[in-house]
Structure formats: structure tokens, C-alpha cells
Amino acid sequence: MTAVPVTTPSTVPTSPTAPVAPPAGTTSRHPSRALRILRVVARGLALALLVGTLGGAAARLWMRLFSVVLGHETGFSWPGTIGVVLVFTVVWVPAALAVVATRRRWRLVPLALAVLLLWYGSALNALADLPECLTSAELAGLAPLGLAFLLTPVAQGRALVRLADRDRRTP
């Protein structure tokens, strides 16, 4: 009968394909599930904050330009500006978490919902602020601003995906 050699965690395997056990008292090289979830949540919240803040600031700029074209008062309050930025940030949180958590196609669903929600809110706000009759010059000035306002959430979603995928390792 031949003796089977006993290997301990500190013993180096002789075969280059044999798995190497981590040294005693240490954990594996892969982060735990809880740590991975924490990283996904932290990164998702950070991306939502970044994209939401930039998009909210852009939306506030478009609102100001709308007011200039229509001849309304152009002063905005800080609480109103913070509110717009906060709404844009909160809307992007679920989408950012989905984009950071996976590369599967279903992550586009929260992105599309965020864009649609921001479009809906923007349309309601614009319709409430528009006067009943506009001159052709006002309409000509509002058309590019309206398009820019609609493209802002789309650009936010694209930036969110690009930022989330930028540092992700390929499997």
C-alpha cells in the first residue's frame, strides 16, 4: 500500500493547475457577498448623485432660458434649485443601482422609466408655465430649448451607463 501525501494550506502544490488554498487565518481572494452588495449600493448612489446633480443643474438652466424667452421673471430661489436637483437625483437612484449591479438588458428598464418620469414631470411643469397664446418668435425660441430639455434625461442615462461600465472588469 502506498502512502498518500498529506498537503496542508502552507504546502505549495506541485501541479501548476492545482488550486492553492489561502494561508490559514485569511479569507479567499474574492470579496464576500455582503461586501459586493455594499460596493454596488455605494457606487450606484454616487453615480445617481453625480448624474442627478448635473442633470438637475442643466434642467434649471433650461428653465431659466425658458423664462428669458417668454419674458418672465428669471430669478430662481435656492430652495427651488435644490428641490429640482434632489428630484433628478432621487429619480436616478433605482436606475443607477440596476446599471451598476448587472450588465444584463433588463437594466435598461429602470433607465427608460427614469427618462419617462422626468419627461412627464418636465412636460407638466412646462404646460403649467406656458402662456395660452405664444408668438411665432417665442415658439421659435422655445423649440430648441424644449428639445434640449427632452434630451437632458437621455444624456443622463447614457452617461450613467458609460460611467458604470467604464471601470467594470470583463469576465
Image: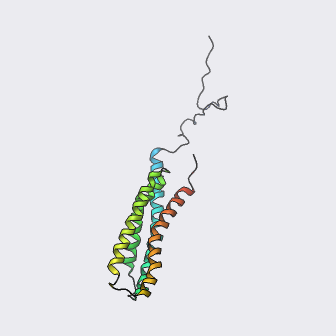
Q: Left or right: 90 with respect to 2?
A: left
Q: Quadrant of the C terminus?
A: top right
Relative side of 16 to 77, left or right: right
Quadrant housing residue 5: top right
Nearer-the-camera pick, 96 or 153: 153
Residue 95 image offset from top left, x and y in percent: 43, 58
Against 8, residue 152 (above or below) is below
Quadrant where the image shows the N terminus: top right
The type of colouring in the image is rainbow
Percent x, y of residue 29: 56, 42
Image coordinates of residue 137 in percent, x first then y, are 44, 87
Closer-to-camera residue (113/160): 113
Pinpoint residue 12: horizontal percent, then vertical percent. 65, 31
- The answer to whether residue 63 is above or below residue 8 is below
Q: Residue at x 51, y 59 (%)?
A: 161
Task: Name the side, left or right, on which 45 lies relative to 5.
Answer: left
Is residue 65 at least partly visible in the picture? no
| Residue at the top extreme of this rendering | 1
Count of numbered circles on the image = 0
Judge whether residue 98 can be spotted in this image: yes
Quadrant assignment, res 97: bottom left
Instruction: Name the residue nearer the viewer: 154 or 2.
Output: 154
